Image (spheres, rainbow, N blue to C red):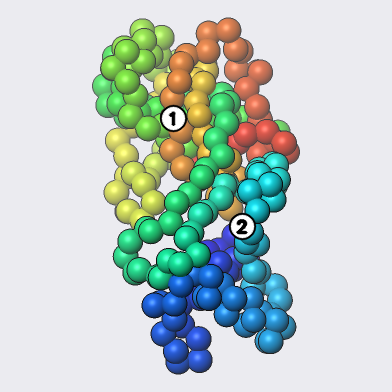
């Protein structure tokens, strides 16, 4: 795993020509820790912390402001199985707001919303696309979204359909005046944008665009172009 320019090591499946995939995770973890100690490995290699103490694990969740995405759980007796996710992941999510700068699908009933936030210089930055909107929310947005009355800050931009694909989205730019409440993972990409799609909750008619958190503002929820 690569985190902020560092390699975060949490498992060991091969060492010195030996296949360790059949070993239980507890033994693989011990071998990984011994590897770091014996070879005095340092940054950019980092040993991911591990514990069997629930209290310690709960304490780690307080580090979400520093970019901790969540926790992974593996059975101590579990071998490594390639191509399957035999472990579980607990993601930390939070509720926040962003403006809608564009949509996919028809304007009267959009399929997804492309979200933005203003940075410190007043530029509207693309933060992330939403998951598929519910029929009710899509219709409600269709009643309030309008096409830009002036040159849109995203005019001429292209938006990727998703990670690992070269396909671009067909979008309709809208006046970035509608605030949407969303649930997001705390994980960010290298640019400070939300790494995963945002889950839409509701239109925030009671929140002015000036009240939406700034893009990459320290201690707030930000987020992709």
**Crowd band around label 1 with a 10 angstrom C-alpha radius: few (<14), some (14–19), many (20+):** some
What x and y, as percent, mark residue 19?
Answer: 41, 85
Residue 150 can be seen in this image: no
Give whichever of 131, 72 is nearer the camera: 72
- On the image, numbered disc 2 is attached to which residue? 52
Residue 89 located left or right of residue 136: right
Residue 12 located left or right of residue 68: left
What x and y, as percent, mark residue 65?
Answer: 69, 41
Residue 65 can be seen in this image: yes
* Secondary structure of the residue carrying numbered label 2: loop
Q: Which residue is pictured at 58% across the width and 26% down the height?
A: 96
Residue 224 located left or right of residue 34: left
Q: Which residue is pictured at 70% across the width and 42% down the height?
A: 62
Residue sitting farthest toward the bottom: 17
- On the image, numbered disc 1 is attached to which residue? 199
The part of the image, by quadrant, that contains residue 49 is bottom right
What x and y, as percent, mark residue 129?
Answer: 42, 35
Q: Is residue 164 above or below residue 156?
A: below
- Count of marks placed on residues: 2
The part of the image, by quadrant, that contains residue 161 is top left
Residue 177's mark?
none
**Crowd band around label 2 with a 10 angstrom C-alpha radius: few (<14), some (14–19), many (20+):** few
* Secondary structure of the residue carrying numbered label 1: strand
Q: CA distance from mark 1 to mark 2?
A: 31 Å
Give whichever of 54, 135 is nearer the camera: 54
């Amino acid at each position: 795993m690569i985190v902020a320019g560092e390699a975060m090591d949490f498992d060991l499946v091969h060492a010195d020509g030996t296949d360790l995939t059949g070993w239980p995770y507890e033994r693989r973890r011990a071998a990984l820790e011994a590897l770091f100690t014996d070879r005095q490995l340092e940054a950019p290699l980092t040993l991911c912390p591990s514990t069997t103490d629930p209290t310690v694990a709960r304490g780690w969740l307080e580090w979400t402001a520093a970019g901790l995405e969540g926790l992974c759980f593996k059975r101590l007796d579990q071998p490594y199985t390639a191509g399957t996710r035999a472990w579980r992941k607990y993601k930390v999510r939070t509720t926040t707001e962003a403006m809608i700068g564009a949509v996919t699908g028809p304007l009267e009933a959009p399929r997804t919303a492309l979200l933005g936030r203003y940075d410190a210089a007043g530029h509207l930055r693309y933060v992330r696309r939403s998951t598929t909107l519910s029929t009710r929310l899509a219709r409600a947005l269709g009643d309030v979204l309008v096409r830009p009355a002036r040159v849109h800050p995203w005019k001429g931009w292209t938006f990727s359909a998703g990670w690992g694909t070269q396909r671009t989205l067909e979008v309709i730019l809208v006046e970035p005046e509608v605030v949407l409440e969303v649930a997001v993972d705390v994980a960010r990409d290298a640019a400070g944008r939300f790494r995963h799609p945002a889950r839409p909750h509701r239109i925030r008619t009671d929140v002015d665009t000036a009240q939406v958190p700034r893009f990459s503002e320290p201690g707030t929820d930000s987020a992709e172009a």
